[in-house]
Amino acid sequence: MTPVTGAFARRLIACLDVRAGRVVKGVNFEGLRDAGDPAALAARYDAEGIDELVVLDVTATAEDRLALARTVSAVASNVFIPLAVGGGIRSVDDAARVIEAGADKVGVNTAALGDPALISRIAGRFGSQAVVVAIDAKRDGGRFEVCSHAGRTPAGWEAVAWAREAESRGAGEILLTSIDADGTLQGFDCRLTAAVSDAVGIPVIASGGAGSAADFVEVFTAGRADAALAATIFHDATCRVRAVKDALRRHGLPVRL
């Protein structure tokens, strides 16, 4: 299968969860362990052919804003691919600081749930293409409950409804994380991903649970995702970016060179 480029190519995204200037990773949003230096990991992923990077400040406290800006600047200077940054973005000024540090997009989550107009304000300043609304969701019977504050607090929204609201407010993309699948290496939640993908007209990035190249194939087909994000398997090099792209090509899914 000949590799292609363009708007319909499926994107692979590596996530760098950062705390105190170091990349960390856990399971179900808990038990964080050190996973390396963010700038070094970013450079490695760029060389391996990752399509985009996401940097998330998992502590997201006000006193960490300058530290996060330094991390963003260090990462941005090591890559030549789109970079999204999230975690504690509460205002247009917060968004401006990370964009000035080198981010191409900003991610909002808890603050947007409390003030949905924040999405519109950031989109109005920087354009919808720069706004990624992160949705952390967990199964609750037959529905998917949105949670805030790093997955700890029910937010009162169902995932599909909140995704539609975020799109109407000006979001350019949805970063959809399954709390149940996060860090388990057991595969993406394709039912959750498909439900949101079918409900909105903007790209949906699937996140949480990637353990093999086959999981990416499944989330791009059964889950109908536009992009897929992973951390653990890329950080630990148990599955390389090129191996995933080769698997996608074998299944007729276009990928970027």
Image (cartoon, grey):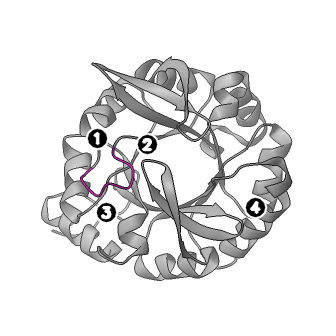
Look at mark 2 in the image and give the residue it sits on: 177
Amino acid residing under circle 1:
Asp
Amino acid residing under circle 3:
Val
Residue 89's label in the rendered image is none
Q: Are marks 2 and 3 in contact (CB under 8 Å)?
A: no
Amino acid residing under circle 2:
Thr
Q: Is residue 222 above or below residue 70?
A: above
Q: Which is more N-terminal, label 4 or label 3?
A: 4
Look at mark 4 in the image and give the residue it sits on: 68
Location of the N terminus (image quadrant): bottom left
Q: Are marks 3 and 1 in contact (CB under 8 Å)?
A: no
Measuring 68% from the left and 52% from the top, which residue is drawn there? 59
Please give the range of residues in magenta: 181-187
Q: Which is more N-terminal, label 1 or label 2?
A: 2
Distance from label 1 to label 4 (Cα)?
30 Å
Distance from label 3 to label 1 (Cα)?
21 Å
Q: Are marks 2 and 4 in contact (CB under 8 Å)?
A: no
Distance from label 3 to label 4 (Cα)?
31 Å
Look at mark 1 in the image and give the residue it sits on: 189
